[in-house]
Structure formats: C-alpha cells, structure tokens
Image (cartoon, rainbow, N blue to C red):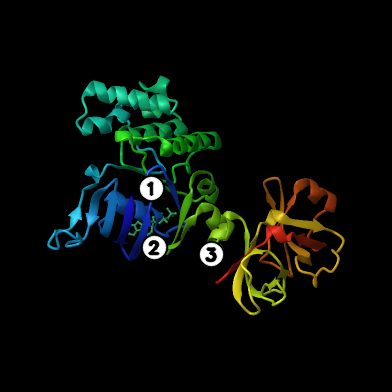
C-alpha cells in the first residue's frame, strides 16, 4: 500500500505519506483530533482526497496527468465499494435483521459470489474467529466482543486487499480485546485472496497495542505525520511529549554538559546510552519511571553525581502494581515505586527521597 494524500474535513487539513507492506501491521497513533480516522476515511475513499493511493498494485487515487506513460490521463478515483479495502471501526455495525452468517456472507454476495460459496466462505471465516457455533444468531444475540469478531469475519470474507482498523479494541473488555488482537495478528500473516498477505493499518490510542502488534508506527499530529519509524524506536525514543506521555516514559530536554553527561533544564545530571551530546548540544533523554530506584537515605553524591538526585514528594498517584510519584524539585520526572517497596518506604507527601537510575536505562538522543 502506497499512500501520499491530502484531504480536508471542514477546517481541518490532512497530509500524509507512507507505505505499508503486505503482511505488515502499521500502527497509527496520535492525540484526539490529529486526523487518524480522517486518514482511514481518505484511504477508503469515503472522504475525497487529492494525491495517490495504491493498494496491491491497483491505483485507487491519482491526480490528473500523474502517470508517466500518459500525461493527459484523467484523475483516478475508485469508489469505496470497488476499492477492495475493508474499514472496520470501533462499533461493529452489523445488519441487525440478518443472521451473523448472512452478515458475513453479505460482502461476497455483493461481489457476485454464488449463494452457496458465499455461505461456505462466511462459515469458514466465522469458524476462524471462534463463532462457528453462533452463525444462525442475530447480532443482538451476541456480546459486544462477539459482535466485533463477527465484524472482523465480515471484513475478511470479502477478501480485501487491505484492512483498515479504527480503534477496533476500544469498546471491548480485556479478554475480548485480547482475542481480537490475536485474530488480527494472525490475519496479517495469513495469505488472503490470490495467496497474498495484506497490509493492515491499525489506528489505536494505546501505544502498547502498537508495540504488541505493529512492526512500524506512524505518529499523527495536527493532520500531519510527526514520526514514522519502527515501533520500538517510536516508543523507546519518543520524539514528542505526546508519545512519551502515551508510552509512559519520562522525556526531558537535555543539553550536553561536556563531561559525557547531559543536564536537564531543572538541573538533573544524567549519563546514558545512545547519542553523545557535545558541550552545549541540544537533545533529549528518555527513561522509564519504573527504572528509577527509590530510597529514603540520600544516595552518595546525590545532586552532584550523574544519575542520582533527591527530592521532596509532592504527588502520589496509584498505578497498576504500585505508586507513581513526583517531586517538587523535578516535577517533570515521574518515578514508579512497586507497591511492596512503597509500603517499606512508607511513602507520603512531603517525604524526602533519594533516586538513582542506571546509565543503561537512560537513552540520549541528539536534536530537539
Ligand atoms: N464530519 C466532520 N466535519 C468536519 N470536521 C470534522 C468531521 N469529522 C472530524 N472532523 C474534524 O477533523 C479533525 C480530525 O478528526 P479525526 O476524527 O480524524 O481525528 P482522530 O485523530 O481520529 O481523533 P480521535 O482520536 O478523537 O478519534 C478534528 O479536528 C475533527 O474535529
């Protein structure tokens, strides 16, 4: 899939270019209103866009005169129904009056597949998503998770060339989401029609979904692609405070101190791995709140030795398995303390604590 498009929705402008390969899951993350759904709608052809969309070697959108072989060629716009792209949103949107089997067979039937074959294909797809026994039910007789799985089966039954998923796990409880995740991961690697695996574009709010499922991630911001890289790079070395917050890591501006360490604006001295910042060179440091060790007795050299500091607790916030704290001296630094250790320390607001983080857990990046 090759996408290079621009689209407008009211006053909102979108511009995005990327490629997604067959068998690949590409995650798209970004704040609310950054244009993730708009991007999927434009690829699916629901929203008029200018630029190029190519899927499985078929040109679905192309500007006039864009083809090398024919400068007079007219603009290409294949309508949504003929794009062979399946778009699946948060809500399953099954036809309530049809059985689950008929819902899944609907796509193939609309493509002209004979009734018996469409039914066979629907049953096979339902079997694959674990709904083989529920094919005769109406959607209302299924749970939300089962409905979403039926919708995935329906999307796949049309044997699309690409699958676009918009927050497909958002409305599901944890077990249903896990099941849907497995299904989608398996699907990416399964050869579809004609023995081809297909690209999957997955819009998600949860960077951990990206980490579990997607080799590469696109970060959207204000209608543009802010970062496009391997997911491990996006999460491990976020370029924006937004991704850092989503990924749950500390990201601080830093300046090379000239002694191999870097200094943050609030005076934290840190040594880490990654890029070497010369004296005065700007960059950023990233470390996980959970990689910081907390103690009541000040660490040796706290304040003067890199990777050690102290502070007075101002904020305590429960997190799964422990407590996240912040200090008055370094409010931008979150520190996670496991519950057992929190009990031992007797964590409380106003408490003075010592902190240290291993060099190996701090990553330094040059540039802003
Ligand atoms: N039908 C519409 N008419 C006009 N503007 C719209 C319409 N739908 C969305 N927008 C605007 O387009 C922008 C992008 O919205 P979009 O839904 O693509 O963002 P998103 O990243 O998917 O957000 P979310 O994470 O909240 O789903 C927003 O500013 C939104 O207000």
Q: Secondary structure at mark 1?
A: loop
Against 285, residue 157 (above or below) is above
Residue tagged 3: 240
Residue tagged 2: 223
N-terminal of the two: label 2 or label 1?
Answer: 1
- Of 324 and 216, which appears nearest the observer? 216
User: What residue is drawn where x is 29% and y is 28%?
Assistant: 105
Marks 3 and 1 close (CB-CB < 8 Å): no
How would you rate the neighbour count of disc 3 (Cα within 10 Å): few for under 14, some for 14-19, many for 20 or more?
Answer: some
Query: Residue 38 at what x, y percent from top left?
Result: 35, 55
Quadrant position of the C terminus in the picture: bottom right
User: What residue is drawn where x is 63% and y is 70%?
Assistant: 276
User: What residue is drawn where x is 54% and y is 59%?
Assistant: 243
Q: Is residue 103 visible?
A: yes
Q: Disc 2 and disc 1: Cα gap in Å? A: 23 Å
- Of 132 and 2, which appears nearest the observer? 2
Question: In the rendered image, which quarter is residue 149 located in?
Answer: top left
Query: Residue 9 at what x, y percent from top left?
Result: 31, 60
Q: Is residue 99 visible?
A: no
358 left or right, relative to 197: right
Name the disc covering residue 21, or none.
Answer: 1
Q: Disc 3 and disc 2: Cα gap in Å? A: 15 Å
């Amino acid at each position: 899939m090759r996408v290079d498009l621009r689209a407008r929705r009211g006053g909102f402008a979108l511009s995005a270019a990327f490629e997604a390969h067959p068998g690949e899951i590409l995650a798209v993350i970004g704040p609310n209103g950054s244009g993730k759904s708009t991007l999927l709608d434009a690829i699916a052809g629901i929203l008029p866009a200018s630029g190029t969309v190519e899927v499985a070697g078929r040109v679905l959108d192309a500007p006039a005169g864009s083809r090398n072989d024919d400068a007079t060629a007219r603009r290409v716009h294949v309508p949504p129904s003929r794009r062979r792209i399946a778009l699946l949103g948060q809500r399953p949107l099954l036809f309530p009056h049809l059985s689950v089997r008929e819902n899944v067979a609907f796509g193939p039937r609309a493509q002209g597949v004979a009734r018996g074959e469409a039914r066979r294909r629907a049953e096979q797809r339902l079997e694959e998503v674990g709904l083989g026994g529920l094919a005769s039910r109406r959607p209302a007789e299924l749970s939300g998770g089962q409905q979403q799985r039926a919708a995935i089966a329906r999307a796949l039954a049309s044997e699309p060339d690409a699958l676009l998923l918009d927050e497909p796990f958002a409305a599901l409880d944890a077990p249903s989401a896990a099941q849907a995740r497995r299904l989608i991961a398996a699907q990416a690697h399964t050869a579809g029609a004609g023995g081809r695996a297909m690209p999957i574009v997955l819009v998600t709010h949860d960077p951990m979904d990206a980490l579990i499922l997607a080799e590469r991630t696109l970060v959207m911001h204000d209608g543009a692609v802010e970062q496009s890289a391997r997911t491990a790079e996006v999460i491990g070395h976020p370029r924006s405070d937004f991704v850092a917050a989503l990924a749950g890591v500390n990201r601080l501006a830093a300046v090379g101190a000239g002694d191999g360490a870097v200094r943050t604006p609030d005076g934290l001295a840190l040594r880490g791995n990654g890029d070497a910042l010369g004296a005065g060179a700007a960059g950023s440091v990233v470390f996980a709140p959970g990689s910081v060790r907390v103690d009541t007795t000040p660490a040796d050299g706290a304040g003067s030795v890199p990777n050690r500091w102290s502070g007075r607790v101002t904020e305590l916030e429960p997190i799964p398995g422990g407590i996240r704290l912040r200090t008055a001296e370094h409010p931008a630094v979150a520190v996670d303390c496991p519950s057992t250790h929190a009990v031992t320390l007797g964590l409380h607001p106003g408490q003075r604590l010592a902190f240290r983080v291993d060099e190996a857990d701090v990553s330094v990046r040059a540039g802003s």
